[in-house]
Amino acid sequence: MKTMNLPITLSIPELKELYKSKKLAPEDLIQEIIERAEADKEYNIWITPPSSEMIQPFLDQLKTIDPEQAPLWGIPFAIKDNIDLANVPTTAGCAEFTYEPEEHATVVRRMIEAGAIPVGKTNLDQFATGLVGTRSPYGEARNALNPELISGGSSSGSAVAVAHGQAAFALGTDTAGSGRVPAALNRLVGFKPSLGAWPVKGVVPACASLDCVTVFAHSLEDALLVDQAARGFDEGDPWSRSIKRRSNALPEKILLVKEMASFFGPYASEYEQAWETALGKIKNLGLPVEYMDGSYLSEAAAVLYDGPWVAERWADLGSFITENEHTAFPVTEMVLRSGAKPEYDAASVFKAMHKLQGFKQRAHRQLENAVLVMPTAGGTWTRGQVRENPIETNSKMGLYTNHCNLLDLSALAVPGDDAGADLPFGITLFSINENEHLIAGLADLFLHGKDAPENKTTTLIGVCGLHMKDFPLETQMEEHGAEFVSVAKTAPVYKMVKLPSTPPKPGLIRVSEDGVSIELELWEIPLAELGRFAANIPAPLGIGKVQLEDGTEVPGFVCEALAAENSEDISHTGGWRYLPE
């Protein structure tokens, strides 16, 4: 079976459709990937490259798996070479460190159980220490679009493998931004779940308390498909947490930092213009935008490399470095040895922990129902420029990423408009760990905009009473396939009454004067269900147009004006949820 017409970029839904129609077989796809990897050798993508010998057992295993029951059946994926694949060497970018694991890392095992095919182990900044992609004795991973530029690190090979069509998705890791910076520099989506949401068992630690496994993909949809397979508590992993990602929803507001964004390197002006373009798009999404003081984010980030947290890297790797002097990549060894400074004693660690706890509480309060948007990287450079100035360039790369894991945030890096020809630019969306659905929902809106009317299959509906979350009729919303989106407010042109029914219900009535703003909830309901849902609503209630605070209108619960004559006016409460018991 020929694969000559196979697209360069590999998409999970497209591959599944090709398999289903019998136009493609996994064996032929793998052969194509092996040929692509050989043709791209100068990009230094792989440490263990794709080979028939390594991949064949996984192809054989596919024959025992029902494609209908395996969401990633036949989907090729790459693995950063600090994540274990059983019986294949793990190097962490250092040949002398190499060991051969007997079992898969938990996330790798889950991918394989979902039907995915591991195709190789990718290059990285040694010991996952760096954001540039040049700190590897296996060669500098080259940018997928412009090989003279850096690829970003430390998950460099994983990103370039996806960008060059040698995997549909790739696993990376992220401690300081390694799952996001390479996404931005190679025009990809990079999803960094909350700490512990994906197990890190079988991952060579960088900073064990901060490490995350991440995914690179061409689309948000592909990244979230991988998330469904990877997520879940692992009792064998002491860092694992049970964090469920809810259905995509939009935040109440978007946060930007007050401080003007700074960019560095030879393309600083192009990056600045691309950020301004992204800001314009963000402000036109129809969501409230507020500005916050972001100075404490940089102060928190400084703890990672300019504070005692670097000692955690030394705690994990110090014995190897001292026993194998001058074996590690020079700049990597220098960074790791900085963790052995005498000033990084126990007292300094606790001082930093206490300071970070205050920053963390502040961030989680500000982001309670909001999403923070920042540039992904502070600039980009040629590989030669980074080689000449490895520390400063790396530091500026992490200007907008280093705070993330220290503050227990989740992050989603998505492409913006290119800053120039073959010069990708990206933004990152941040949320608190329990609100990953908000960065997913906002990313979807940013990337795809609102559905055109002819393609729209769902609609928002405003709910202001017993159908709201944690109220008795919430189950009716779920029965009709509705999903909660966000809390919102009406325009100040309504009053709310308490109807004399059993049980009591609210009535939202539009008035010509003395109106107030009433809190409600926005849910997304399939259009096919809306009529059936509305038919069950008793008079004097019904579904009509409700004007929101931002001037837009959505279908929602309204009440006949005549009902006010025999009902108690409760407008002063601001919403049914605040009605005194």
Image (spheres, rainbow, N blue to C red):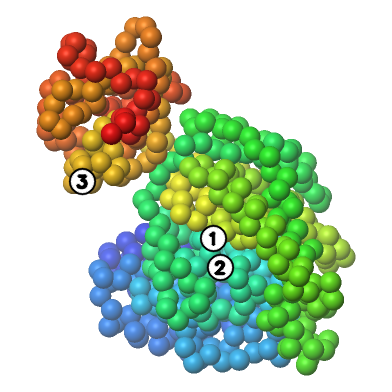
Q: Residue at x 71, y 67 (%)?
A: 350
Q: From this viewpoint, which residue is outermost toward the right?
A: 388
Q: What percent of the width, then of the height, locates residue 28?
A: 40, 75
Dot 3, how many residues are within 10 Å of its Cα: few (below 14), some (14-19), or many (20+)?
some
Dot 1, how many residues are within 10 Å of its Cα: few (below 14), some (14-19), or many (20+)?
many
For mark 3, give the secondary structure. helix
Q: From this viewpoint, which residue is outermost toward the top?
A: 513
Q: Residue at x 37, y 20 (%)?
A: 572
Q: In the rendered structure, are the residues bearing label 1 and label 2 in contact, judged by CB atoms less than 8 Å apart? A: yes
Q: Would residue 316 be found to the left or right of residue 389 on screen?
A: left
- Disc 3 versus disc 2: nearer the observer: 3
Residue 52 makes an appearance in the image: no
Please name the residue that numbered disc 1 is placed on: 192
For mark 1, give the secondary structure. strand
Please name the residue that numbered disc 2 is placed on: 212
Question: Which quarter of the rendering shows the C terminus?
Answer: top left
Find residue 521 and name its label: none
Find residue 475 and name its label: 3
Q: Would residue 129 be found to the left or right of residue 412 on screen?
A: right
Q: Tell me the amino acid under the disc marked 3.
A: Thr
Q: Is residue 79 above or below residue 578?
A: below
Q: What percent of the width, then of the height, locates residue 259?
A: 73, 38
Q: Is residue 445 above or below residue 412?
A: above
Q: Tell me the amino acid under the disc marked 2.
A: Cys
For mark 2, give the secondary structure. strand
Q: Nearer the viewer, residue 183 or 22?
A: 183
Residue 84 makes an appearance in the image: yes
